[in-house]
Amino acid sequence: NAGVMQNPRHLVRRRGQEARLRCSPMKGHSHVYWYRQLPEEGLKFMVYLQKENIIDESGMPKERFSAEFPKEGPSILRIQQVVRGDSAAYFCASSPRRQSNTGELFFGEGSRLTVL
Amino acid sequence: GENVEQHPSTLSVQEGDSAVIKCTYSDSASNYFPWYKQELGKRPQLIIDIRSNVGEKKDQRIAVTLNKTAKHFSLHITETQPEDSAVYFCAASKGNQFYFGTGTSLTVIP
Protein backbone atom coordinates (compact mmCIF):
# COMPACT_ATOMS: atom_id res chain seq x y z
CA ASN A 1 0.00 0.00 0.00
CA ALA A 2 1.77 3.10 -1.22
CA GLY A 3 1.79 6.05 1.11
CA VAL A 4 0.50 9.52 0.39
CA MET A 5 2.03 10.60 -2.89
CA GLN A 6 2.74 14.22 -3.65
CA ASN A 7 4.12 15.73 -6.81
CA PRO A 8 6.07 17.56 -7.77
CA ARG A 9 8.49 17.33 -4.87
CA HIS A 10 10.10 20.58 -5.91
CA LEU A 11 8.59 23.33 -7.99
CA VAL A 12 10.12 26.62 -9.07
CA ARG A 13 7.91 29.38 -10.36
CA ARG A 14 8.40 33.01 -11.26
CA ARG A 15 6.19 35.66 -9.74
CA GLY A 16 2.82 35.77 -11.47
CA GLN A 17 2.86 32.16 -12.66
CA GLU A 18 0.58 29.40 -11.47
CA ALA A 19 1.54 26.50 -9.24
CA ARG A 20 -0.33 23.20 -9.17
CA LEU A 21 0.44 20.69 -6.46
CA ARG A 22 -0.99 17.19 -6.56
CA CYS A 23 -1.75 14.72 -3.84
CA SER A 24 -2.87 11.12 -4.11
CA PRO A 25 -4.07 9.88 -0.73
CA MET A 26 -3.38 6.42 0.60
CA LYS A 27 -5.56 3.70 -0.83
CA GLY A 28 -8.88 3.62 0.97
CA HIS A 29 -8.52 7.12 2.39
CA SER A 30 -11.26 9.58 1.53
CA HIS A 31 -10.13 12.56 3.61
CA VAL A 32 -7.41 14.91 2.37
CA TYR A 33 -5.81 17.80 4.20
CA TRP A 34 -3.40 20.45 2.97
CA TYR A 35 -0.93 22.19 5.28
CA ARG A 36 1.63 24.89 4.61
CA GLN A 37 4.94 24.99 6.39
CA LEU A 38 7.21 28.00 6.22
CA PRO A 39 10.91 27.52 7.04
CA GLU A 40 11.36 26.76 10.73
CA GLU A 41 7.66 27.15 11.41
CA GLY A 42 4.77 24.88 12.22
CA LEU A 43 2.11 23.23 10.10
CA LYS A 44 -0.59 25.70 9.16
CA PHE A 45 -3.91 24.18 8.21
CA MET A 46 -5.20 25.28 4.84
CA VAL A 47 -8.06 23.08 3.69
CA TYR A 48 -9.82 19.79 4.38
CA LEU A 49 -11.57 17.94 1.59
CA GLN A 50 -13.48 14.79 0.97
CA LYS A 51 -14.26 13.45 -2.48
CA GLU A 52 -15.92 16.24 -4.47
CA ASN A 53 -16.48 18.33 -1.34
CA ILE A 54 -14.59 21.06 0.46
CA ILE A 55 -15.35 20.50 4.12
CA ASP A 56 -13.28 23.28 5.69
CA GLU A 57 -11.27 25.91 3.87
CA SER A 58 -10.92 28.28 6.80
CA GLY A 59 -7.14 28.25 6.54
CA MET A 60 -6.98 29.05 2.87
CA PRO A 61 -6.19 32.60 1.72
CA LYS A 62 -9.29 34.11 0.14
CA GLU A 63 -7.58 35.00 -3.10
CA ARG A 64 -5.36 33.09 -5.52
CA PHE A 65 -5.63 29.76 -3.66
CA SER A 66 -8.04 26.96 -4.48
CA ALA A 67 -8.27 23.25 -3.85
CA GLU A 68 -10.21 20.36 -5.22
CA PHE A 69 -10.54 16.63 -4.72
CA PRO A 70 -12.41 15.24 -7.71
CA LYS A 71 -14.22 11.95 -7.87
CA GLU A 72 -11.40 10.55 -9.94
CA GLY A 73 -7.76 11.56 -9.64
CA PRO A 74 -5.62 13.34 -7.10
CA SER A 75 -6.40 16.32 -4.94
CA ILE A 76 -4.98 19.52 -6.39
CA LEU A 77 -3.89 22.67 -4.61
CA ARG A 78 -3.73 25.53 -7.05
CA ILE A 79 -2.00 28.83 -6.45
CA GLN A 80 -2.53 31.49 -9.05
CA GLN A 81 -0.26 34.50 -9.64
CA VAL A 82 2.30 33.29 -7.14
CA VAL A 83 4.25 35.76 -5.03
CA ARG A 84 7.51 35.29 -3.13
CA GLY A 85 5.59 34.86 0.13
CA ASP A 86 4.04 31.67 -1.27
CA SER A 87 7.41 29.95 -1.09
CA ALA A 88 6.95 27.14 1.40
CA ALA A 89 6.59 23.41 1.79
CA TYR A 90 3.05 22.23 1.16
CA PHE A 91 2.16 18.98 2.86
CA CYS A 92 -0.79 16.81 2.03
CA ALA A 93 -2.15 14.32 4.52
CA SER A 94 -4.88 11.74 4.32
CA SER A 95 -6.93 9.72 6.74
CA PRO A 96 -9.46 6.96 6.31
CA ARG A 97 -13.18 7.46 6.52
CA ARG A 98 -14.33 6.83 10.07
CA GLN A 99 -17.70 6.75 11.68
CA SER A 100 -16.65 7.89 15.11
CA ASN A 101 -13.24 8.62 16.56
CA THR A 102 -10.56 10.25 14.51
CA GLY A 103 -7.58 8.29 13.33
CA GLU A 104 -4.05 8.89 12.27
CA LEU A 105 -3.07 11.42 9.65
CA PHE A 106 -0.59 10.13 7.11
CA PHE A 107 1.58 12.77 5.51
CA GLY A 108 3.15 12.93 2.10
CA GLU A 109 6.74 14.00 1.55
CA GLY A 110 5.66 17.52 0.72
CA SER A 111 5.98 19.79 -2.29
CA ARG A 112 8.51 22.56 -1.92
CA LEU A 113 7.54 25.64 -3.85
CA THR A 114 10.10 28.30 -4.59
CA VAL A 115 8.96 31.55 -6.13
CA LEU A 116 11.69 33.56 -7.82
CA GLY B 1 -12.09 26.77 16.80
CA GLU B 2 -9.36 24.86 18.58
CA ASN B 3 -6.15 26.58 19.71
CA VAL B 4 -3.10 24.43 20.44
CA GLU B 5 -0.08 25.95 22.14
CA GLN B 6 3.24 24.13 22.37
CA HIS B 7 6.31 24.82 24.54
CA PRO B 8 9.22 25.10 24.38
CA SER B 9 9.93 26.08 20.79
CA THR B 10 13.51 24.83 21.09
CA LEU B 11 15.03 22.31 23.47
CA SER B 12 18.59 21.06 23.85
CA VAL B 13 19.45 18.10 26.04
CA GLN B 14 22.50 15.99 26.65
CA GLU B 15 22.41 12.48 25.27
CA GLY B 16 20.87 10.18 27.86
CA ASP B 17 18.84 12.90 29.55
CA SER B 18 15.06 13.21 29.32
CA ALA B 19 13.12 15.67 27.19
CA VAL B 20 9.63 16.96 27.91
CA ILE B 21 7.42 18.89 25.52
CA LYS B 22 4.11 20.36 26.65
CA CYS B 23 0.96 21.32 24.81
CA THR B 24 -2.32 22.90 25.82
CA TYR B 25 -5.58 22.95 23.93
CA SER B 26 -8.74 24.99 24.25
CA ASP B 27 -11.64 22.85 23.02
CA SER B 28 -12.83 20.32 25.57
CA ALA B 29 -14.46 18.36 22.74
CA SER B 30 -11.06 17.37 21.32
CA ASN B 31 -10.61 13.68 21.95
CA TYR B 32 -7.51 12.54 20.08
CA PHE B 33 -3.97 13.82 20.63
CA PRO B 34 -1.22 12.63 18.29
CA TRP B 35 2.46 13.54 18.32
CA TYR B 36 4.44 13.79 15.11
CA LYS B 37 8.19 13.80 14.54
CA GLN B 38 9.62 15.60 11.54
CA GLU B 39 13.25 15.12 10.61
CA LEU B 40 14.92 17.75 8.47
CA GLY B 41 13.47 17.76 4.98
CA LYS B 42 11.19 14.82 5.69
CA ARG B 43 7.50 14.26 6.24
CA PRO B 44 5.92 14.42 9.72
CA GLN B 45 5.44 10.92 11.08
CA LEU B 46 3.27 9.75 13.93
CA ILE B 47 5.28 8.55 16.92
CA ILE B 48 2.61 8.16 19.57
CA ASP B 49 -0.98 9.14 20.20
CA ILE B 50 -3.48 9.16 23.03
CA ARG B 51 -7.24 9.30 23.22
CA SER B 52 -9.25 11.23 25.76
CA ASN B 53 -10.33 8.15 27.66
CA VAL B 54 -6.72 7.37 28.58
CA GLY B 55 -4.44 9.30 30.93
CA GLU B 56 -1.07 7.92 29.92
CA LYS B 57 0.46 5.81 27.19
CA LYS B 58 3.98 4.51 26.82
CA ASP B 59 5.95 3.03 23.95
CA GLN B 60 9.53 2.13 24.85
CA ARG B 61 11.34 5.44 25.48
CA ILE B 62 8.38 7.60 24.56
CA ALA B 63 5.39 8.37 26.73
CA VAL B 64 2.48 10.76 26.51
CA THR B 65 0.31 12.01 29.36
CA LEU B 66 -3.05 13.72 29.12
CA ASN B 67 -4.83 15.86 31.70
CA LYS B 68 -8.34 16.48 30.36
CA THR B 69 -9.35 18.73 33.22
CA ALA B 70 -6.43 21.08 32.67
CA LYS B 71 -6.53 20.55 28.90
CA HIS B 72 -2.88 19.78 28.54
CA PHE B 73 -0.81 16.88 27.31
CA SER B 74 2.89 16.19 27.28
CA LEU B 75 5.46 14.13 25.42
CA HIS B 76 8.24 12.53 27.43
CA ILE B 77 11.34 11.06 25.82
CA THR B 78 13.72 9.23 28.13
CA GLU B 79 17.34 8.23 27.51
CA THR B 80 17.53 10.56 24.54
CA GLN B 81 19.74 9.66 21.60
CA PRO B 82 21.14 11.82 18.80
CA GLU B 83 18.61 10.31 16.38
CA ASP B 84 15.83 11.82 18.49
CA SER B 85 16.92 15.23 17.18
CA ALA B 86 14.00 16.53 15.11
CA VAL B 87 11.01 18.84 15.24
CA TYR B 88 8.10 17.48 17.26
CA PHE B 89 4.50 18.59 16.72
CA CYS B 90 1.57 17.98 18.99
CA ALA B 91 -1.98 18.05 17.68
CA ALA B 92 -5.51 18.03 19.05
CA SER B 93 -8.31 16.51 17.05
CA LYS B 94 -12.06 16.22 17.16
CA GLY B 95 -14.13 14.64 14.46
CA ASN B 96 -11.98 14.82 11.38
CA GLN B 97 -10.26 18.09 12.19
CA PHE B 98 -6.63 18.30 13.31
CA TYR B 99 -5.02 21.35 14.90
CA PHE B 100 -1.24 21.42 15.27
CA GLY B 101 1.04 23.13 17.72
CA THR B 102 3.88 25.30 16.43
CA GLY B 103 6.52 22.63 16.95
CA THR B 104 9.51 22.03 19.21
CA SER B 105 12.97 21.70 17.74
CA LEU B 106 14.78 19.12 19.87
CA THR B 107 18.55 18.80 19.71
CA VAL B 108 20.25 15.94 21.50
CA ILE B 109 23.90 16.72 22.14
CA PRO B 110 26.19 13.68 21.98
Image: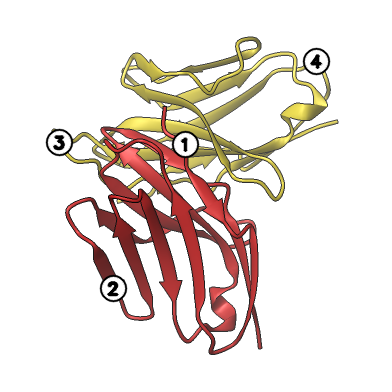
Q: Which mark's residue is nearer the viewer, 1 or 4?
A: 1
Write down the residue under mark 2.
B58
Q: Chain of mark 2?
A: B
Q: Which mark's residue is nearer the viewer, 3 or 1?
A: 1
- Say whether mark 1 and mark 2 are on the same chain: yes
Q: Amino acid at mark 3?
A: Ser
Q: Chain of mark 3?
A: A
* Residue at 22% in and 50% down: B52
Instruction: Name the spot of residue B88 as percent of width and height, x first.
Output: 52, 59
How far apart marks 1 and 4 lie (CA) works out to 34 Å
Q: In the rendered structure, are the residues bearing label 1 and label 4 in contact, judged by CB atoms less than 8 Å apart?
A: no
Residue A68, placed above or below residue A86? above
Query: Is residue A13 something one can see in this rendering?
Result: no
The label on residue A16 is: 4
Q: In the rendered structure, are the residues bearing label 2 and label 1 in contact, judged by CB atoms less than 8 Å apart?
A: no
Q: Amino acid at mark 4?
A: Gly
Q: Amino acid at mark 1?
A: Asn
Q: Is residue B58 left or right of residue B26?
A: left
Query: Which chain corresponds to the colour red?
Result: B
The label on residue A81 is: none
Q: Residues within 10 Å of mark 4 (few under 14, many from 20)?
A: some
Write down the residue under mark 3.
A100
Q: Is residue A46 left or right of residue A17?
A: left
